[in-house]
Image (cartoon, helix red, strand yellow):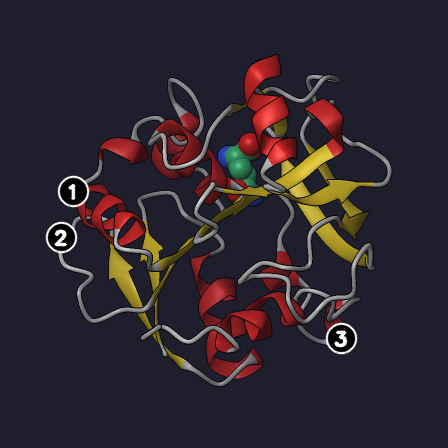
Amino acid sequence: MRFAVISFPGSNCDNDLYYAIKDGIRENCDMVSSEDTNLNMYDVILLPGGFSFGDYLRSGAIASLSPIMKSIKEAANNGKIIIGICNGFQILTESHLLPGSLIKNNNMQFVSNWEKLSVSNNQTIFTNEYKKNEQINIPVAHGEGHYYCDQDTLASLKDNHQIVFTYNNNPNGSISDIAGIVNKEGNVLGMMPHPERAVEDILGSKDGLKLFKSILNHNVRS
Ligand SMILES: NC(=O)CC[C@H](N)C(=O)O
């Protein structure tokens, strides 16, 4: 599989993500600028964490207007695999590739901690290596990580099993403890915690590695 990590001005987790793919699961990976427009050669597109465009306006709002976003939307509609982590999740909601939005943490503070997550849905492209309700340790680092959506959207997320990860000790006020969701079709994942920072024991956990390994079980040609 060919992976692309999209680098936006202000991304700061792009190298970590590149490392997780190259060294963690030993797959082909390129760094692609958000100013580029062609993603045809890639099977998996990764939007990293960081502070794209300084988080001005709202986190992810300006990045969602980048030249690369047209190709990302096309790729998503064609069923390619897309993952947005932290700022990447914010960019995906701002681009309406995922429902809802990320707003300021309830305590109005930046939170940087290890969090216990539950894998609420292990039947996805991203979680098939985990057990159902497996407890995993993944770090968070965000100021605008409170996932918010209206009640109809929440009901539809639940009905369609789109809630993939939940927090055991909600650090930001997210509705229904949501830490990560997929789109209805199941090919786009957004999550606030950082699996790419948990890919080897020396980092404190390698619970994030199974997320990237899960993708390899998906037949891209099917
Ligand atoms: N680590 C990150 O991606 C930070 C996300 C975002 N800029 C926030 O603080 O909410």
Q: Amino acid at mark 3?
A: Ile
Q: Which residue is mark 3?
A: 202
Q: Position of residue 52 (x, y in %)?
A: 38, 38
Determine the CA span between mark 2 and mark 1: 6 Å
Label 1 crowd (10 A; few <14 / some 14-19 / many >=20): some
Residue at point 63%, 62% (across, down): 127
**Where residue 67 is drawn, which disc sits there?**
1
Relative to 124, 9 lies left or right: left
Image point (74%, 22%), residue name:
173
Say which of marks 3 and 2 sits in front: 2
Q: Ligand 1 shows up in which quadrant of the image?
A: top right
Residue 211 seen in render: yes
Q: Quadrant of the N terminus?
A: bottom left
**Quarter of the view holding residue 132:** bottom right
| Vertical side of 1 occupied by 155: above or below | above
Amino acid beneath label 1: Pro
When asked about the image quadrant of residue 67, the answer is top left
Q: Position of residue 218 (x, y in %)?
A: 47, 73
- Disc 2 element: loop
156 left or right, relative to 140: left
Q: Which of the pair 164/179 is nearer the observer?
A: 164
Asked whether residue 172 is in view, the answer is no
Question: Residue drawn at (62%, 53%), measured in percent from left and top?
Answer: 194
Residue linked to disc 2: 37
* Residues at discs 2 and 1 in contact (Cβ within 8 Å): yes
Secondary structure at numbered mark 3 = helix
Q: CA distance from mark 3 to mark 2?
A: 37 Å
Amino acid type at mark 2? Thr
Q: Quadrant of the C terminus?
A: bottom left
